[in-house]
């Protein structure tokens, strides 16, 4: 297996950064329950920072649907990594009609939880603004 490395300067020292073939590694990481290794990788952290800067740290879901500016803290994979590991670091994807879409979307925590109800962190009794709107709160 051929490994590729980049070198970055940390202070006065050069540090080697290993490049991964994430498209091949992600299915195995998912199977092993270790997908966090991808999300903690230099490659993803670097891409995440790049995407957040590009969109000025603004939640794109809040902008589109709530018409307000909220600070984005998460980069959401529109087409989930589990389904499309080939797009894990792609900022955009093209659908079957040739239309270009955002693949890595900056979102706030609340919107990210809404986008992932399968993870059990959805609203659970709260309205879309994150607050309870009924009389019973316990």
Image: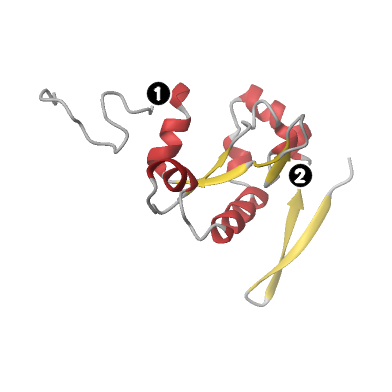
Residue furthest to the bottom: 12
Q: Provide the secondary structure element on which disc 2 rests.
A: loop
Q: Position of residue 51 (x, y in %)?
A: 59, 54
| In the displayed structure image, the side of residue 110 where residue 56 appears, left or right | right
Circle 2 residues within 10 Å: few <14, some 14–19, many ≥20 = some
Q: Provide the secondary structure element on which disc 1 rests.
A: loop
Q: Quadrant of residue 15 in the image?
A: bottom right
Circle 1 residues within 10 Å: few <14, some 14–19, many ≥20 = few
Q: Position of residue 87 (x, y in %)?
A: 71, 38
Q: Quadrant of residue 25 in the image?
A: top right
Residue furthest to the left: 135
Vertical position of residue 10 compared to residue 124: above or below: below
Q: Quadrant of residue 82 in the image?
A: top right
Q: Position of residue 111 (x, y in %)?
A: 42, 38
Residue at the image point whose x is 62% and y is 75% from the top: 11
In depth, the one of 70 and 82 nearer the eye is 70
Q: Which mark is residue 74?
A: none
Vertical position of residue 22 compared to residue 117: above or below: below
Residue at the image point whose x is 89% and y is 45% from the top: 2
- The colour scheme used here is secondary structure
| In the displayed structure image, the side of residue 11 where residue 70 appears, left or right | left
Residue at the image point whose x is 69% and y is 44% from the top: 92
In depth, the one of 56 and 6 nearer the eye is 56
Which residue carries the number 2 mark? 20
Return the disc, 2 or 1, that comes first in the chain's sequence.
2
In depth, the one of 42 and 109 nearer the eye is 109
Pair 2/1: label in front:
1
Vertical position of residue 68 compared to residue 138: above or below: below
Which residue carries the number 1 mark? 120
Residue at the image point whose x is 15% and y is 25% from the top: 134
In depth, the one of 132 and 97 nearer the eye is 97
Q: Position of residue 53 (x, y in %)?
A: 55, 61
């Amino acid at each position: 297996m051929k490994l590729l490395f980049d070198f970055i300067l940390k202070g006065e020292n050069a540090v080697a950064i290993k490049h991964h073939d994430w498209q091949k590694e992600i299915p195995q990481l998912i199977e092993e329950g270790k997908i966090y290794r991808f999300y903690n990788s230099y490659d993803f952290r670097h891409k995440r920072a790049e995407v957040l800067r590009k969109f000025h740290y603004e939640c794109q879901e809040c902008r589109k649907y709530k018409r307000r500016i909220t600070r984005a803290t998460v980069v959401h994979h529109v087409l989930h990594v589990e389904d499309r590991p080939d797009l894990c670091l792609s900022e955009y994807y093209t659908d079957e009609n040739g239309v270009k879409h955002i693949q890595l979307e900056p979102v706030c925590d609340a919107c990210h939880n809404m986008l992932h109800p399968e993870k059990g962190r959805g609203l659970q009794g709260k309205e879309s603004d994150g607050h309870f709107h009924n009389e019973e709160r316990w």
